[in-house]
Image (cartoon, rainbow, N blue to C red):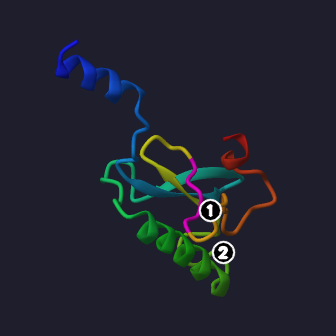
Amino acid sequence: MNSKEAYEIIDTGWAKKPKGYRVRFQRRVDSEMVTDYFPDLDEGPWKSQVAIWRMAWRLAESRQSDPPEVNGGDLVNIYVVDDGGNPIKYYATDQFEVFNPADTPSDLSEA
C-alpha cells in the first residue's frame, strides 16, 4: 500500500468536521409552517459554531418583544444545523437546543 492509498482509506473512514453552520427555523405563512435558513441556502454557511448559535439566540430573543406580525412573522423551532442539515448540539450545554419551540414538533425530533 502506498501513501496515497493509505490516505484515501483514512479519509473515507475519518469523521468529517462540518464545513459550516446555518440557523434553521420555521415561521407560519398563511396556515402552513415554512422552513427557512440563515444564511440563505444560496449563501455560504458561517464557519463559527459559536457565532451562528449567538445569531440563533438573537433571532429568538428578537421575537420576544414584537408581535408576530412585525418583522417577518413569528420565528419558531430555531436551532443550528451543519452543512449536511444535521442538528448541532449547543456548545454551551452540549445538548440539543431549540429556541422558541412551537406547539407543533420540529424536524429536530426526527433527527
Q: Nearer the viewer, residue 94 or 47?
A: 94
Q: Residues within 10 Å of mark 2 (few under 14, many from 20)?
A: some
**Residue 89 on image: x %, y %:** 59, 57
What amino acid is at disc 1? Asp
Q: Residue at x 66, y 56 (%)?
A: 30
In the picture, which quadrant includes the C terminus? top right
**Residue 55 on image: x %, y %:** 47, 72
Q: Is residue 11 left or right of residue 63?
A: left
Q: CA distance from mark 2 to mark 1?
A: 30 Å
Contact check, label 2 and label 1, Cβ < 8 Å: no
What segment carries the magenta color? 87-91
Point out the tag, 2 or 1, that comes first from the N-terminus. 2
Q: Which mark is residue 68?
A: 2
Residue sitting farthest toward the right? 103
What amino acid is at disc 2? Pro
Q: Residue at x 60, y 69 (%)?
A: 73
Residue 25 sits in which quadrant?
bottom right
User: Looking at the image, is 94 positioned above or below residue 57?
Assistant: above
Q: Nearer the viewer, residue 56 or 13?
A: 13
**Magenta portion: prevailing SS class:** loop
